[in-house]
Amino acid sequence: MSELVVDGSSDDLSDFAAEIADQVESFVIAVREVARGAEPGGAVSMLLLEVSQLLLAGGRLGAIGDVVPTERWEPDAGPDPDIDELRERLAALLAPIDRYVEVFDPYETPPSAANFVLSDDLADVTGDLLHGLQHYQAGRPIEALWWWQFSYVSHWGTHAGAALRALQSVVAHARLDVEGLAG
């Protein structure tokens, strides 16, 4: 993959950043709404849809060359987003399905299973996205793109992918009437 050094004035990348920012904002709004618990019966379906949409944005970030801003240091985006309440609300809402097992790295020899927590995954992904959104809202779209791309590859992509598989599994169990998760 090639490095894409930008000067911050690229219209194409600014448009791309705006598209990713829209997808990020949509995800954050939806996850916060789900966490409020007003529609607990639809939480898994809504999260499945939103995580799927977000992973489309992640795939787009992963498919382009590395975005490297001209300045090789990250400007202060402000305080880290507080996601503790979101994490707690999601944990309460998803309690029966919150813990799951995932193969963290399928290319590890031998692959090993890891314990994951759905509420942690969703909250951590949201925190990563909000950090980039702070850059975007401060008028630094290239910095936002860099952050979203870097954190997709290094963190939130893995957790969103694992969460997607867990959510899809819950839906499959419920639809196929497999005991244990359908309740």
Image: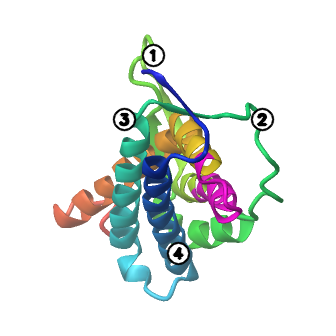
Asked if disc 3 and disc 1 are in contact, CB closer than 8 Å, the reply is no
**Is 36 situated above or below 108?**
below
Q: Is residue 74 magenta?
A: no
Question: Mark 2 or 3 closer to N-term?
Answer: 3
Quadrant in which the C terminus appears:
bottom left
Q: Nearer the viewer, residue 120 or 145?
A: 145
Across and down, in percent, residue 25 comes to 52, 68
Question: Mark 4 or 1 closer to N-term?
Answer: 4
Q: Is residue 134 magenta?
A: yes
Tag of residue 63: 3
Comparing labels 3 and 1, the label whose residue is closer to the camera? 3
Comparing labels 4 and 1, the label whose residue is closer to the camera? 4
- The three-letter code of the residue at mark 2 reads Trp
Comparing labels 1 and 2, the label whose residue is closer to the camera? 2
Q: Which residues are magenta?
A: 126-142
Determine whether the residue tagged by mark 4 lies in a helix, strand or loop. helix
Question: Mark 3 or 1 closer to N-term?
Answer: 3
State which quadrant residue 32 falls in.
Answer: bottom right
**Is 52 situated above or below 65?**
below
Across and down, in percent, residue 150 comes to 58, 37
Category of crowding for the residue at label 4, using alpha-carbon neighbours closer than 10 angstroms: few (below 14), some (14–19), many (at least 20):
few
Category of crowding for the residue at label 1, using alpha-carbon neighbours closer than 10 angstroms: few (below 14), some (14–19), many (at least 20):
few
Q: Main secondary structure of the magenta part?
A: helix
Comparing labels 4 and 2, the label whose residue is closer to the camera? 2
Tell me the residue that label 1 is attached to: 108
Q: Residue furthest top?
A: 109
Q: Tag count in the figure?
A: 4
Asked if disc 4 and disc 1 are in contact, CB closer than 8 Å, the reply is no
Determine whether the residue tagged by mark 2 lies in a helix, strand or loop. loop
Tell me the residue that label 2 is attached to: 73
Q: CA distance from mark 3 to mark 1?
A: 23 Å
